[in-house]
Image (spheres, rainbow, N blue to C red):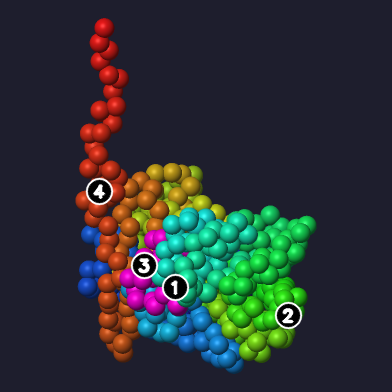
């Protein structure tokens, strides 16, 4: 039944569904055209692909889910797809941009986001970064109370930046420890349930009349919606308490972060943005009433299902009785999956060299990558039609945090990324990022300093 799209064997809802072949059929169509154009094949053995129609549809679903809120700014978390053309497309679709480093701020500006549609988060902003953001008029969420003192000192007169404070409602973690932002000991935001935490926040708002926003980013992959909604509820009630205590509506907006989890087990978008706003409405009825403008910061849920990685099978072999396909997509582009296979399983599709779905009996095989460490395996003992040299594998749902965020291990090049649109019987492509060249790899590996260490030899001692 699962011709070429398999599922996590250990996942309870991982039974093949009627929807399962849709992504396979879609990827096959794109692959066949990509092979014809030479975008994937022997000379270019791995690439990322992004569905621009799908991205537009995801953005539209987000806007529609919040369409009753009088004032809302949906920002895209740049780290989920730090590619300028993608950010440009999102800007064109009416989104703002959430950034967390000078590099991401630069990408957002290059993509054409107006400063007042950019939100700067980061737990480690330097004074210089803060000063630049304030000077540009970029919104900024302080991570802690000390950062507020820096902002106070650096704020120019007439500063246009909206300034918020990130809080950690400490409602608990999700299924993936490393991804959980609202645990008791999370490094993010002011811990509300710690002794004096809440009071400290109230006092900070009293002291700084320019502080007008509360920020919480509670969710992430592995977090149930109810937990995210509870965290946002805590934040909303804190805003109400602060405004009541101060006797004025100083807090005018709430930044509720992103963190909607993504279903990696099959084609269904689950949960949807509508599911999320339903959960929010029931947990925090006042949230959509218009008393506060809202900001969101979704990343994974907008892009994950709108992209895939395609990679060539270079060799197949047997080892310890197990069949292994050695492909060109490993830890350099599927880093999380390789390093934390239990938390980040991916569906894998099997196609022939022309991009036609492979048929034939499924056999358990490992899908390995090109990196020189034993654990560079994307899928272990996966039931797939037997893969052969020159075949193509597809790693589904990798539109966020995968090929856009490569790892430089083994000096493997950053793979090329192509946008596409399926247009009747045709598929049109547009370049998003070129594959890294050997010259670029050498340059970023210090080639111009090649001789410098030799000069650190001990000086000749003169007596
Ligand atoms: C990563 C991050 C996001 C986006 O998270 P997703 O899980 O990709 O939606 C939003 N806000 C902040 C502060 C983040 O660190």
Magenta residues, as a range?
A: 97-117
Q: Is residue 305 visible to us here?
A: no
Of label 1 and label 3, which has the lower sequence position?
3
**Sequence-wise, which precedes: disc 1 or disc 4?**
1
Name the secondary structure under disc 3.
Answer: helix
Give SS at disc 4.
helix
Looking at the picture, tell me which residue is in the foreground, 285 or 71: 71
User: Is 2 displayed left or right of 49 in the figure?
Assistant: right
**CB of mark 1 within 8 Å of CB of mark 4?**
no
Residue, disc 1: 137
Q: Is residue 98 magenta?
A: yes
Alpha carbons under labels 1 and 4: distance apart: 35 Å
The residue beneath circle 2 is 247
Of pointers 2 and 1, the one earlier in the residue sequence: 1
Q: Real-space Cα distance between discs 1 and 3? A: 16 Å
Instruction: Indicate the quadrant where residue 235 lies.
Output: bottom right
CB under 8 Å between discs 4 and 2: no
Side of 286 relative to 309 (left or right): right
Residue under label 3: 107
Contact (Cβ within 8 Å) of mark 2 with mark 1: no
Residue drawn at (55%, 71%), measured in percent from left and top?
163
Q: Circle 4 is placed at which residue position?
A: 443
What is the distance, in whole Å, between disc 4 and disc 3 at their CAs? 21 Å
């Amino acid at each position: 039944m699962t011709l070429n799209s398999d599922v996590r064997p250990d996942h309870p809802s991982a039974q093949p569904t009627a929807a399962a072949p849709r992504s396979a059929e879609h990827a096959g169509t794109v692959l066949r055209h990509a092979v014809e154009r030479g975008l994937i094949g022997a000379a270019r053995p791995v690439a990322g692909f992004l569905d621009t129609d799908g991205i537009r549809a995801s953005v539209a679903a987000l806007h529609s889910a919040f369409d009753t809120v009088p004032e809302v700014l949906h920002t895209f978390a740049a780290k989920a797809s730090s590619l300028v053309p993608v950010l440009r497309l999102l800007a064109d679709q009416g989104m703002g941009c959430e950034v967390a480093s000078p590099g991401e701020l630069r990408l957002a500006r290059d993509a054409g986001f107006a400063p007042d549609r950019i939100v700067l988060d980061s737990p480690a902003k330097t004074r210089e970064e803060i000063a630049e953001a304030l000077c540009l008029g970029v919104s900024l969420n302080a991570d802690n109370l000390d950062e507020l003192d820096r902002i106070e000192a650096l704020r120019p007169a007439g500063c246009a930046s909206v300034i918020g404070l990130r809080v950690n409602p400490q409602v608990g973690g999700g299924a993936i420890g490393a991804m959980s932002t609202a645990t008791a000991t999370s490094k993010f935001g002011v811990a509300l349930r710690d002794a004096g935490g809440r009071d400290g926040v109230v006092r900070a708002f009293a002291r700084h009349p320019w502080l007008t926003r509360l920020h919480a980013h509670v969710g992430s992959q592995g977090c149930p919606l109810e937990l995210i909604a509870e965290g946002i509820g805590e934040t909303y009630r804190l805003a109400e308490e602060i405004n009541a205590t101060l006797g004025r509506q100083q807090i005018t907006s709430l930044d509720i972060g992103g963190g909607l989890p993504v279903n990696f087990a099959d084609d269904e978008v689950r949960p949807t943005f509508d599911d999320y706003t339903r959960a929010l409405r029931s947990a925090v009825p006042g949230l959509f009433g218009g008393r506060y403008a809202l900001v969101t910061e979704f990343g994974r849920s907008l892009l994950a299902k709108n992209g895939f990685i395609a990679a060539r099978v270079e060799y197949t072999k047997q080892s310890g009785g197990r069949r292994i396909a050695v492909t060109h997509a490993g830890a350099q582009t599927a880093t999380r999956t390789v390093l934390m296979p239990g938390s980040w399983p991916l569906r894998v599709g099997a196609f022939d060299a022309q991009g036609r779905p492979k048929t034939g009996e499924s056999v358990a095989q490992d899908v390995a990558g090109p990196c020189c460490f034993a654990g560079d395996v994307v899928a272990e003992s996966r039931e797939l039609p037997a893969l052969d040299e020159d075949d193509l594998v597809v790693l589904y749902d990798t539109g966020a945090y995968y090929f856009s965020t490569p790892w430089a291990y083994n000096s493997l090049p950053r793979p090329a990324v192509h946008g596409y649109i399926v247009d009747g019987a045709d598929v049109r492509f547009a370049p998003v990022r070129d594959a890294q060249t050997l010259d670029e790899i050498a340059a970023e590996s210090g080639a111009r300093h090649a001789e410098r260490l030799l000069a650190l030899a001990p000086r000749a001692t003169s007596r």
